[in-house]
Amino acid sequence: MTKKIPNYIHPHNLEWCGILPPSIKRTDIVLGLYYNVLCPQERDAEARHKFYAWISDMNPSATFPLKNEELFLCSPSTCKGIANKAFYGQLANMLLKLLNQGITFDLALEKTLEYLENEISSIYIKMGEIFRQRENLEQLTSLKTRYQMLADSFEGCGNDPKKALSYVIRKYENVKNDKEKLEALLVGSIEKGRGQKLRELDYWNHRKKPLIKMIQETIDSYPNAPFFLALHEVTPESLGDLQEAMGDKNLHWLSFNNISGKETTILTPFDEILIGESGSHTATIGLSPELEVKNTSIEYLPNCSGTPRTILGVEVRNAKTGGNFAIFSAHTDYLVQDDLYSKTSETIQIFIKRFTRNGALPFVFGGDLNAFEGMLGAQYLDTLKSQIPLSNTIDYREGKFYSPKEIINATFIGHHRDDYKMAFDEHGNVQPNALDHIFLSLEKILGFRKAGVYDKLGSLVDPVKEPVKFKKYLQERNTTSDHFMNGVLFVSP
């Protein structure tokens, strides 16, 4: 029996109309694009690879391999998370070994946790002591803080393994009765925990050309429509690339550094005032010249991962129609624990209610909401939309919707070294998920999704003209981001 796809992943009134949305030349419409473009991964890739190799040796007495200039490149999220990811890999390795011996999942998990507590946790504590000593000796604040983060992370894994592993264990428990998915998740965790090298095809410098071309082609399909780009995981570096490549569009860029809270500027790690701001995610929206900014506001969202998350609100006036509306872009935390979903919903509801004057100002809201299947993602969205003004919105997928069939039920694919990457079914369709969403209180014309599949030369592959090639490179995960681009066309006030 085919498993029913939840309504929050595939709305019951979604009307699939084709692969690519039609070009429309109306002057009273606005194009909205929401896209998690995936931050450049290569910045600290070599440093992370050396770091993982050192952890995997499980020998604290071995010389720590990173020089100061290499550690400088490691972001706060890397410093806070590298111990956990290595720990995840060791959990997965032992768990998979025991499962392959025919032991039941629950017993295998119990034995694996005992092994980590009795055999591995003390090594992590010793590694934490090494970083604590370096923290105490270091005079340079930017390095001292990184050593502090590393010490806290390793000591946290060593002193309370069950707490450190609680997030990943929940993922395993959600699929423990699906052997294929569980094994894929475990193998992915093992590879991530060993610091599997990043493919060159996944470097930002390789992805950015087809990514920008896809955005530009989409914009050019609606020559008379004002538009906005609500982008996530844009770093100061990638923002500069986007601004340069799209210079002919004369966009007004609103971008705020998630760590400093200030307007985004390009910095080197050595110029940082706040740790990690040179490579931080930003809250970024690009506006076409017709959309005149009247008001802006930004709010920090709850997070459990330690990585700052925000919602950005912008009120604009459409010079073509004279009407005002608001644009909201959010990127919420991925580490679902400590009542994260409830706290996030409340913060977003209060922010939007205040900004729109209790819904008097029409709006479009979207972003990477990290609504996970099997982790109460559907209930999270129900809660989010339970109060005015979000209760008066429609989903961008309701009614006319355009998308390649392979991704119609997925907003996220994941790249090769991700332990959480999505699987494919026998037809080449991406495993159903809905991390990204768009809701609007305006009249919707159509919604769509694009994959950004490209070949080995970096050229976009047209899913209509080259369907076989499209499916091939999609399954090879040659995509401009680990997320897909979502868009909506709506009537402007």
Image (cartoon, rainbow, N blue to C red):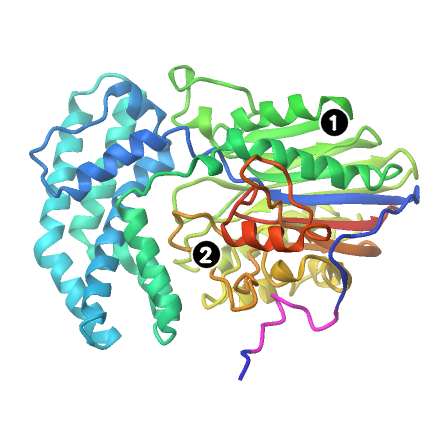
Residue 160 shows up from this direction: yes
The image shows residue 119, relative to residue 478, as above or below, that is below
Q: Residues within 10 Å of mark 2 (few under 14, many from 20)?
A: some
Q: Amino acid at mark 2?
A: Leu
Residue shown at the point (19%, 76%) measured from the top left: 103
Q: Are marks 2 and 1 in contact (CB under 8 Å)?
A: no
Residue picked out by circle 1: 251
Q: Nearer the viewer, mark 2 or mark 1?
A: 1
The image shows residue 237, relative to residue 123, as above or below, that is above
Span highlighted in magenta in the image: 4-14
Residue 314 shows up from this direction: no
Q: Nearer the viewer, residue 64 or 208?
A: 208
Q: Is residue 7 magenta?
A: yes
Who comes first in sequence, dot 2 or dot 1? 1
The image shows residue 474, relative to residue 265, as above or below, that is below
Horizontally, residue 416 falls left or right of residue 253, namely left
Q: Nearer the viewer, residue 153 or 175?
A: 175
Q: Residues within 10 Å of mark 1 (few under 14, many from 20)?
A: some
User: Which of the 4 image quadrants contains residue 64?
Assistant: top left
Q: Amino acid at mark 1?
A: Leu
Q: Position of residue 260 (x, y in %)?
A: 49, 27
Residue 340: numbered disc: 2
Q: Position of residue 242 (x, y in %)?
A: 63, 27
Residue shown at the point (55%, 25%) measured from the top left: 262
Q: Element under label 1?
A: loop
Q: Element under label 2?
A: helix
Majority secondary structure in the magenta region: loop
